[in-house]
Image: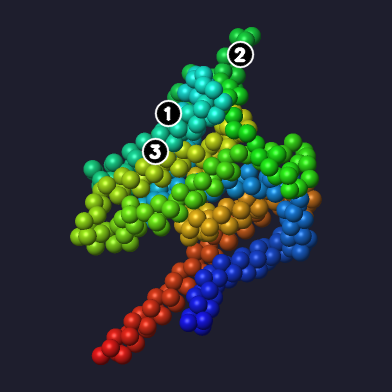
C-alpha cells in the first residue's frame, strides 16, 4: 500500500518537475545564445521576487489570471474549449463600468452591484456560444473566436465614444465616468501589514484576491462535490454514456458555458474596482488567453491553477526587472512562458500514457487472477 502511494506521488510530481527542469535548461540555452548570463538573470528574478512589494505585485497579477483560468477550466471539464474569455470579460467590465457609474448605492452594496452586472453580462455572452452549439451545432471554438471580435471591435468600439466621461469644464475624458467610491473594493494592505512591515512604494493588494479565493473554493465544490458537477464531468468524458445515463447533454453545455462566462465576468474587476475605476482604451487586455494557459498548466485543478497563476505572475513581474538591470531581455520571459507551457503539456501527456498502461496491466492481472 505504501509502495502504491509512493508511486502515485512520483507520477503526480513527474510532469511538473520534468517540465520545470526542461524549461530551466532550454531557457538557459536561449539566454547563453543571446549573450546573457543565465545565473545572473535567474538571481535577479529571485532577489526581486522575495521583496514584499514584489510579492504584492505578483499577487495582484496572479489574481485575475487565476479567475480567468477557472473560467476556462469550467469549459475544459465539459470538454468545451471556451477561448472567448477575453471578449467576455472585456464586455462585462465595460457594461459594469457604464451601468455602475449611473447607479447610486451605499458602500458594499454598490460594489456587489457592479460585480453582479459583470457576472450577468459575462454569463449571457458566453451562454450565447453555448446556445449556438446546442441549437445550430456551431463549434464553440469558432463561435467564441468570432464573439471575441464582436465584443471588442464591435460592441465596445461602437458604444465606447458615447459613454466617455464629461468633465465639469466641458472637456471629454479618455474613459467612462469613474465609479463612485462606494463601488471601490478595499485593499488588503492592513491585513498584510499585521504580519509584515509597512507596504511602501504605493503598492496595494487588491481585495479581489478574496473573490478569487472564493471562486476557487466554489469551483472545487461544484466540480468535485456536487451532482451537477459530476454530470458536467461525465458529459465531458463520455457524452454518449452520460446521455444513456439520463444526463441532458444540451443542458450541461449551456450550464458549463454560462458558468464559464459568469466567472469570466470577474476577470476585469481588479482594474475596475481597485485601480482605474473606469473603462478606457488602456484597459488591461489578453488576460482571457493567459487564463487558458493557466488552466492547461494547472490541469484544471483549483490548486494547480494557483501555482500556474503565481508562476506566470512571477515571470510577468520579472520582465521589467530584467530589462532595468540589463541582465536579460524582457522578451526572455515570453519565451520562458511558452517553453514551460509546451513542456508541461508534453510531460502531462507522457505521464497519462504511463498511468493508462499501468491501469490496463492491473486490470489484465486482476482478470487473470479471477479467471
Residues 151 and 239: in front is 239
Label 1 Cα neighbours within 10 Å, binned few <14 / some 14-19 / many ≥20: few
CA separation in Å, label 1 and label 2: 24 Å
* Residue at 54%, 42% in the rendered image: 211
* Residue at 35%, 80% in the rendered image: 360
As drawn, is 130 to the left or to the right of 159?
left
In the picture, the quarter occupied by the C terminus is bottom left
* Residue 149 makes an appearance in the image: no
Q: Is residue 177 above or below residue 221?
A: above
Sequence-wise, the earlier of marks 3 and 1 is 3
Q: How far across and down, in percent of the image, does residue 247 sit? A: 24, 54
* Residue at 73%, 60% in the rendered image: 42
Which residue has dot 2 on it? 167
Q: Which residue of the protein is positioned furthest toward the front in this rendering?
A: 194
Q: How far across and down, in percent of the image, does residue 9 sit? A: 53, 74
Q: Are marks 3 and 1 in contact (CB under 8 Å)?
A: no
CA separation in Å, label 3 and label 1: 16 Å
Task: Kindly state the secondary structure of the residue where label 1 is placed.
Answer: helix
Tell me the quarter of the picture where residue 262 sits.
Answer: top left
Q: Nearer the viewer, mark 3 or mark 1?
A: 3
Q: Is residue 44 above or below residue 127?
A: below
Tell me the quarter of the picture where residue 150 sits.
Answer: top left
Which residue has dot 3 on it? 123
Q: Which residue of the protein is positioned furthest toward the top in this rendering?
A: 169
Label at residue 155: 1
Q: How far across and down, in percent of the image, does residue 21 sit? A: 63, 69
CA separation in Å, label 2 and label 3: 33 Å
Q: Is residue 156 above or below residue 3?
A: above
Amino acid at each position: 500500500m505504501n509502495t502504491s502511494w509512493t508511486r502515485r506521488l512520483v507520477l503526480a510530481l513527474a510532469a511538473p518537475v520534468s517540465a520545470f527542469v526542461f524549461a530551466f535548461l532550454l531557457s538557459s540555452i536561449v539566454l547563453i545564445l543571446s549573450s546573457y548570463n543565465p545565473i545572473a538573470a535567474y538571481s535577479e528574478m529571485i532577489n526581486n521576487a522575495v521583496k514584499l512589494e514584489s510579492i504584492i505585485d505578483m499577487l495582484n497579477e496572479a489574481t485575475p489570471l487565476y479567475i480567468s483560468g477557472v473560467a476556462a477550466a469550467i469549459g475544459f471539464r465539459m470538454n468545451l474549449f471556451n477561448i472567448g474569455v477575453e471578449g467576455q470579460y472585456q464586455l462585462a467590465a465595460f457594461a459594469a463600468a457604464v451601468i455602475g457609474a449611473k447607479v447610486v448605492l451605499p458602500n458594499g452594496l454598490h460594489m456587489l452591484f457592479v460585480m453582479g452586472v459583470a457576472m450577468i453580462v459575462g454569463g449571457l455572452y458566453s451562454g450565447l456560444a453555448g446556445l449556438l452549439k446546442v441549437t445550430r451545432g456551431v463549434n464553440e471554438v469558432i463561435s467564441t473566436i468570432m464573439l471575441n471580435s464582436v465584443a471588442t471591435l464591435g460592441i465596445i468600439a461602437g458604444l465606447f465614444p458615447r459613454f466617455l466621461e464629461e468633465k465639469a469644464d466641458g472637456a471629454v475624458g479618455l474613459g467612462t465616468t469613474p465609479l463612485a467610491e462606494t463601488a471601490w473594493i478595499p485593499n488588503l494592505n492592513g491585513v498584510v501589514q499585521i504580519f509584515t512591515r509597512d507596504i511602501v512604494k504605493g503598492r496595494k493588494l487588491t481585495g479581489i484576491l478574496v473573490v478569487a479565493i472564493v471562486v476557487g473554493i466554489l469551483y472545487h465544490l461544484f466540480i468535485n462535490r456536487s451532482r451537477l458537477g459530476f454530470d458536467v464531468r461525465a458529459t465531458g468524458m463520455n457524452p454518449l454514456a452520460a446521455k444513456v445515463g439520463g444526463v441532458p447533454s444540451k443542458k450541461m453545455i449551456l450550464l458549463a458555458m454560462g458558468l464559464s462566462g459568469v466567472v469570466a465576468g470577474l476577470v476585469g474587476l481588479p482594474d475596475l474596482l481597485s485601480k482605474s475605476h473606469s473603462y478606457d482604451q488602456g484597459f488591461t487586455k489578453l488576460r482571457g488567453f493567459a487564463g487558458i494557459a493557466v488552466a492547461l498548466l494547472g490541469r484544471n485543478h483549483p490548486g494547480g491553477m494557483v501555482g500556474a497563476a503565481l508562476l506566470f505572475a512571477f515571470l510577468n513581474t520579472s520582465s521589467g526587472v530584467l530589462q532595468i538591470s540589463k541582465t536579460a531581455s524582457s522578451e526572455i520571459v515570453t519565451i520562458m512562458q511558452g517553453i514551460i507551457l509546451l513542456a508541461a503539456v508534453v510531460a502531462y501527456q507522457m505521464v497519462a500514457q504511463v498511468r493508462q498502461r499501468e491501469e490496463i496491466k492491473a486490470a489484465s492481472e486482476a482478470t487473470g487472477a479471477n479467471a
